[in-house]
Amino acid sequence: MLNLVLFGPPGAGKGTQSEKLINKFNLIHLSTGDILRSEISMGTELGLEAKKLMDEGLLVPDEVVIGMISNKLDSNKDAIGFIFDGFPRTVAQAEALDSLLVSKSSSISGMIALVVNDEELEKRLLNRGKASGRPDDANPEIIRKRIVEYNSKTAPVANYYKGQNKFTSINGIGTVDEIFESISTVVDTF
């Protein structure tokens, strides 16, 4: 099974590249952001709590996210593999994901990190906010808070996967196709 962690700060292009990887490698997309937004749009208790945290630029509790991922894995047992987009965001989540996958006789094949500087991220997110209406992408202060949150809590996850020899970084600045070609070259090695 091909299980990829697509990694990078908000606005790095994970969603765009995930779509291309899904089409090329026939993978199932597991975006915690999409899962949470779905809960928000349905107005569930989890969704309302997640919205409050997301609007403040904070992360949703691990046990909630792991539970949702487990359900998605179980509902797609015949999948060739999965792309984990926006998860894991902490070393604790990476360890929990590894444990979850082992319990399902699987593992992470590799992590691919999209590297983009903070100035470019802020520009991309503000543009996305104008186009999508997402409040967390429209406020420069919240955007900067999300980037700081990523750098302090999420970036150490790269070291976790480096320790397993499963980490590769890709320049996330360039055309969508150039970046995708770099990613595909790495995925082909898995």
Image (spheres, rainbow, N blue to C red):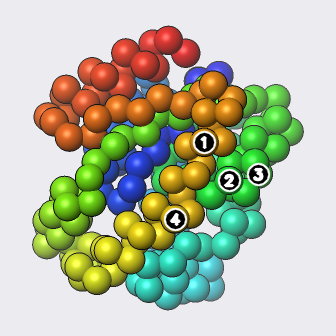
Q: Give the distance between the C-alpha atoms of the residues marked 1 and 3, in whole angstroms.
A: 16 Å
Element type at mark 2? helix
- The spot of residue 125 in percent (x, y) is 23, 65
- The spot of residue 164 in percent (x, y) is 69, 29
Horizontally, is 29 left or right of 70 in the view? Answer: left
Instruction: Tell me the quadrant of the picture where the N terminus can be found.
Output: top right
Horizontally, is 14 left or right of 97 in the view? Answer: left
Q: Residue at x 41, y 33 (%)?
A: 169
Nearest to N terminus: mark 1 or mark 3: 3
Foreground pick, 31 / 12: 12
Nearest to N terminus: mark 2 or mark 3: 2
- The spot of residue 115 in percent (x, y) is 34, 43
Quarter of the image for residue 174 reads: top left
Residue mark closest to the camera, 2 vs 3: 2
Foreground pick, 23 / 120: 120
Residue type at the position of mark 2: Val
Horizontally, is 22 left or right of 81 in the view? Answer: left
Q: Give the distance between the C-alpha atoms of the residues marked 4 and 1, in whole angstroms.
A: 13 Å
Element type at mark 1? helix
What numbered label is drawn on residue 27? none
Q: Are marks 2 and 1 in contact (CB under 8 Å)?
A: yes
Dot 1 corresponds to which residue? 159
Q: Give the distance between the C-alpha atoms of the residues marked 2 and 1, in whole angstroms.
A: 9 Å
What numbered label is drawn on residue 152? 4
Residue mark closest to the camera, 2 vs 4: 4
Q: Residue at x 76, y 51 (%)?
A: 96
Q: Are marks 2 and 4 in contact (CB under 8 Å)?
A: no
Dot 2 corresponds to which residue? 91
Q: Are marks 3 and 4 in contact (CB under 8 Å)?
A: no
- The spot of residue 133 in percent (x, y) is 21, 76
Dot 3 corresponds to which residue? 96
Asked if one can make out residue 26 in the rendered structure from this viewpoint, the answer is: yes
